[in-house]
Amino acid sequence: HHGRRFGKAAKAVRHRQPLTLCYQTLIGPRNLALRAEYRLKRLPRQRKQALVVAQPDRTTLLALLDLDPDTGDQPAASC
Protein backbone atom coordinates (compact mmCIF):
# COMPACT_ATOMS: atom_id res chain seq x y z
CA HIS A 1 0.00 0.00 0.00
CA HIS A 2 0.95 3.63 -0.40
CA GLY A 3 0.92 4.22 3.35
CA ARG A 4 4.30 2.60 3.81
CA ARG A 5 5.97 4.96 1.37
CA PHE A 6 4.46 8.19 2.64
CA GLY A 7 6.98 11.03 2.48
CA LYS A 8 9.33 9.34 0.07
CA ALA A 9 9.99 10.80 -3.35
CA ALA A 10 10.52 8.88 -6.58
CA LYS A 11 14.05 7.59 -7.02
CA ALA A 12 14.73 10.08 -9.81
CA VAL A 13 14.12 13.10 -7.58
CA ARG A 14 14.75 11.73 -4.11
CA HIS A 15 18.22 13.27 -3.87
CA ARG A 16 17.31 16.57 -5.52
CA GLN A 17 15.28 17.89 -2.60
CA PRO A 18 14.00 20.48 -1.98
CA LEU A 19 12.30 21.30 -5.27
CA THR A 20 10.49 24.54 -6.06
CA LEU A 21 7.49 24.85 -8.34
CA CYS A 22 8.44 27.56 -10.85
CA TYR A 23 5.47 27.57 -13.23
CA GLN A 24 1.96 26.22 -13.42
CA THR A 25 -1.14 27.00 -15.40
CA LEU A 26 -4.65 25.61 -15.50
CA ILE A 27 -5.07 23.64 -18.72
CA GLY A 28 -8.66 22.44 -18.53
CA PRO A 29 -10.11 18.98 -19.10
CA ARG A 30 -8.03 16.00 -18.08
CA ASN A 31 -7.54 14.69 -21.62
CA LEU A 32 -6.16 18.06 -22.72
CA ALA A 33 -3.89 18.27 -19.66
CA LEU A 34 -2.53 14.77 -20.33
CA ARG A 35 -1.78 15.65 -23.95
CA ALA A 36 -0.05 18.87 -22.88
CA GLU A 37 1.99 17.02 -20.25
CA TYR A 38 3.07 14.41 -22.80
CA ARG A 39 4.21 17.07 -25.26
CA LEU A 40 5.96 19.11 -22.56
CA LYS A 41 7.94 16.09 -21.40
CA ARG A 42 9.14 15.48 -24.96
CA LEU A 43 10.52 19.02 -25.34
CA PRO A 44 14.27 19.56 -25.01
CA ARG A 45 15.42 20.92 -21.66
CA GLN A 46 16.25 24.35 -23.13
CA ARG A 47 12.71 24.78 -24.51
CA LYS A 48 11.23 23.80 -21.13
CA GLN A 49 13.47 26.31 -19.38
CA ALA A 50 12.40 28.99 -21.86
CA LEU A 51 8.75 28.25 -21.02
CA VAL A 52 9.45 28.72 -17.32
CA VAL A 53 11.05 32.09 -18.04
CA ALA A 54 8.27 33.18 -20.41
CA GLN A 55 5.41 32.04 -18.11
CA PRO A 56 2.94 31.71 -21.02
CA ASP A 57 -0.79 31.79 -20.36
CA ARG A 58 -2.97 28.78 -21.19
CA THR A 59 -3.77 29.82 -24.76
CA THR A 60 -0.16 30.60 -25.62
CA LEU A 61 1.12 27.39 -24.06
CA LEU A 62 -1.38 25.24 -25.95
CA ALA A 63 -0.50 27.04 -29.19
CA LEU A 64 3.21 26.38 -28.56
CA LEU A 65 2.40 22.71 -28.00
CA ASP A 66 0.25 22.67 -31.16
CA LEU A 67 -2.91 21.72 -29.27
CA ASP A 68 -6.44 23.00 -29.87
CA PRO A 69 -7.74 24.42 -26.56
CA ASP A 70 -11.30 23.28 -27.33
CA THR A 71 -10.70 19.65 -28.28
CA GLY A 72 -7.14 18.81 -27.27
CA ASP A 73 -6.38 17.71 -30.81
CA GLN A 74 -3.98 19.23 -33.23
CA PRO A 75 -5.46 22.30 -34.87
CA ALA A 76 -6.92 21.71 -38.32
CA ALA A 77 -4.49 22.57 -41.10
CA SER A 78 -5.58 25.60 -43.03
CA CYS A 79 -5.49 25.33 -46.81
Image: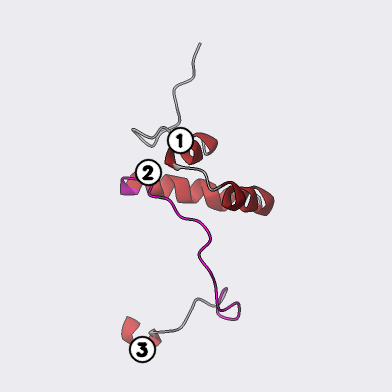
Q: Is residue 4 left or right of residue 39?
A: left
Labels 2 & 3 near each other (Cβ < 8 A): no
In this figure, what is the number of numbered marks?
Answer: 3
Badge 3 amino acid: Arg
Q: Which mark is residue 4?
A: 3
Q: Nearer the viewer, mark 2 or mark 3?
A: 2
At label 1, counting other C-alpha atoms closer than 10 Å, the crowd grade (few under 14, some 14-19, many 20 or more) is many
Q: Is residue 1 visible?
A: no
Residue 41 x/y as whole percent: 55, 53
79 with respect to 31 (left or right): right
N-terminal-most mark, 2 or 3: 3
Please report the residue visible at 60 percent of the width from the left and 81 percent of the height from the top: 15
Q: Rate crowding at label 3 as few (under 14), some (14 to 19) or many (20 or more) other CA atoms within 10 Å.
A: few
What residue did someone put label 1 on? 67
Kindly indicate whether the residue at mark 2 contacts the one at mark 1 (C-beta within 8 angstroms): yes
In the image, what residue occupies the spot 48% across and 79% down? 9
User: What amino acid type should be assigned to the residue bearing mark 1?
Assistant: Leu
Whether tag 1 and tag 3 are in contact, CB under 8 A, the answer is no
Precedes in sequence: disc 1 or disc 3: 3
Magenta region, residue range: 13-30
Residue 30, given in percent of the width and then of the height, sits at 32, 49
Q: Which mark is residue 32?
A: 2
Relative image position of residue 10 (x, y in whole percent)? 50, 76
Q: Amino acid at mark 2?
A: Leu
Identify the secondary structure beneath mark 2.
Answer: helix
Residue 30 appears in the picture as rendered = yes
**Main secondary structure of the magenta stretch:** loop
CA gap, disc 1 and disc 3: 39 Å
**Mark 2 to mark 3 CA distance (whole Å):** 32 Å
- The relative height of residue 51 versus residue 22 in the rendered view (above or below) is above
Label 2: how many Cα within 10 Å (few below 14, some 14–19, many 20+): some
